[in-house]
């Protein structure tokens, strides 16, 4: 799909640099790691993929343990004729977007198991939210992730005038679901756009035109709190978030289950053993198997599930996300 010529101004220079370096780096069998000690802490730079002297860049980078063939295994049906985003999603777009977030800890926090589990967790959300698979689909429903890059038949424009001062809807713009973890509503496009330095409020269509930007937006959402006073999905998953007493009483614990609570609230969580939750979990477990970690390392049900968790935020009106 052709990309709006103005989009170049919307994508950060970090992404542009990573795109330029990807082809060269992919041909190299080794990479140079620059290491320094700053205020008693070791920090590193691994070139285009993990740049900027970060403690997280001293760990393996995502391309060390998750490569093109594994991406193809996870999303094997995305380019079949019946899919709705044929030719859009690819590994290069994923790893280029990830280069922005790896110095901040995305897929680079903890040891090998935690690193690969976080990538599988993130992609578990992506696969579940972009799947066109169903129970008897060829290869099983988990094989059909990244089938979509946008909502196919939106019922409305998702413009909420309550946010007209902070995130006013652009004339003619429609804020239906788009992306790797679909974005809905003008205020979410506005907030995420501010975070990734792209004018998504005026041009929400950028997300369905550029796979790198779509992955970048989803990773930003994963790495940053959705609401003030909440953890990010990243912090909840890797365990850097420490639950308060109220969190403990609400059965919110570090792990995959709480990532669903953060991203979807009572649309998925606190409703018992519902399909909307189990579909996301099943994608995560399937990806763990395909990535060689194994679902047995996913943890017990109370970590995996949010069935009994009290949602961080309860939906109070139709436009809440």
Image: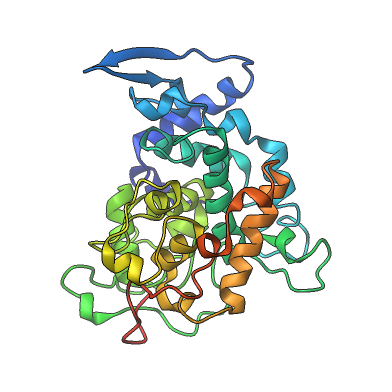
Give the residue drawn at x 84%, y 65%: 138
Q: Is residue 276 visible?
A: yes
Total labels drawn:
0
Tell me: 205 left or right of 194.
right
Relative to 104, residue 159 above or below: below
Viewport quadrant of the C terminus: bottom left
Q: Position of residue 166 (x, y in %)?
A: 18, 68
Tell me: 38 left or right of 182.
left
Q: Is residue 147 visible?
A: no
Give the residue drawn at x 62%, y 48%: 297
Nearest to the observer: residue 14 or residue 33: 33
Tell me: 61 left or right of 5.
right
Q: Position of residue 96 (x, y in %)?
A: 50, 37
Relative to 209, residue 252 above or below: below
Viewport quadrant of the N terminus: bottom right
Give the residue drawn at x 64%, y 19%: 27
Give the residue drawn at x 59%, y 28%: 64
Location of residue 70 (image quadrant) = top right
């Amino acid at each position: 799909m052709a990309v709006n010529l103005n989009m170049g101004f919307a994508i950060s220079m970090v992404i542009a640099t990573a795109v330029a370096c990807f082809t060269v780096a992919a041909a190299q069998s080794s990479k140079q790691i620059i290491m320094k000690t700053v205020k008693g802490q070791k920090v590193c730079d691994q070139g285009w993929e993990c740049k900027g002297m970060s403690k997280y860049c001293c760990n393996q980078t995502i391309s060390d343990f998750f490569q093109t063939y594994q991406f193809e295994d996870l999303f094997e049906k995305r380019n079949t004729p019946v899919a709705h985003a044929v030719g859009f999603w690819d590994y290069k777009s994923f790893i280029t977007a990830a280069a922005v977030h790896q110095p901040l800890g995305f897929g680079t926090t903890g040891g090998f198991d935690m690193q690969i589990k976080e990538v599988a967790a993130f992609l578990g959300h992506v696969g579940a939210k972009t799947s066109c698979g169903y129970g008897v689909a060829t290869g099983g429903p988990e094989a059909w992730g990244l089938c979509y890059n946008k909502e196919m038949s939106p019922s409305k424009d998702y413009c909420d005038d309550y946010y007209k001062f902070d995130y006013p809807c652009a004339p003619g713009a429609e804020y239906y679901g788009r992306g790797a973890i679909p974005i809905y509503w003008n205020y979410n496009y506005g907030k995420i756009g501010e975070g990734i330095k792209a004018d998504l409020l005026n041009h929400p269509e950028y997300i369905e035109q550029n796979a790198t930007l779509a992955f970048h937006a989803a990773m930003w959402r994963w790495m940053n709190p959705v609401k003030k006073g909440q953890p990010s999905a990243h912090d909840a998953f890797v365990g850097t978030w420490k639950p308060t007493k109220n969190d403990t009483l609400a059965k919110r614990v570090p792990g995959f289950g709480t990532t669903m609570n953060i991203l979807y609230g009572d649309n998925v969580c606190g409703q018992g053993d519902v399909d909307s939750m189990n579909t996301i979990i099943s994608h995560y477990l399937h990806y763990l198997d395909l990535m060689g970690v194994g679902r047995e390392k996913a943890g017990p049900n109370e970590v995996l599930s949010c069935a009994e968790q009290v949602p961080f935020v309860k939906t109070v009106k139709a436009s809440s996300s």
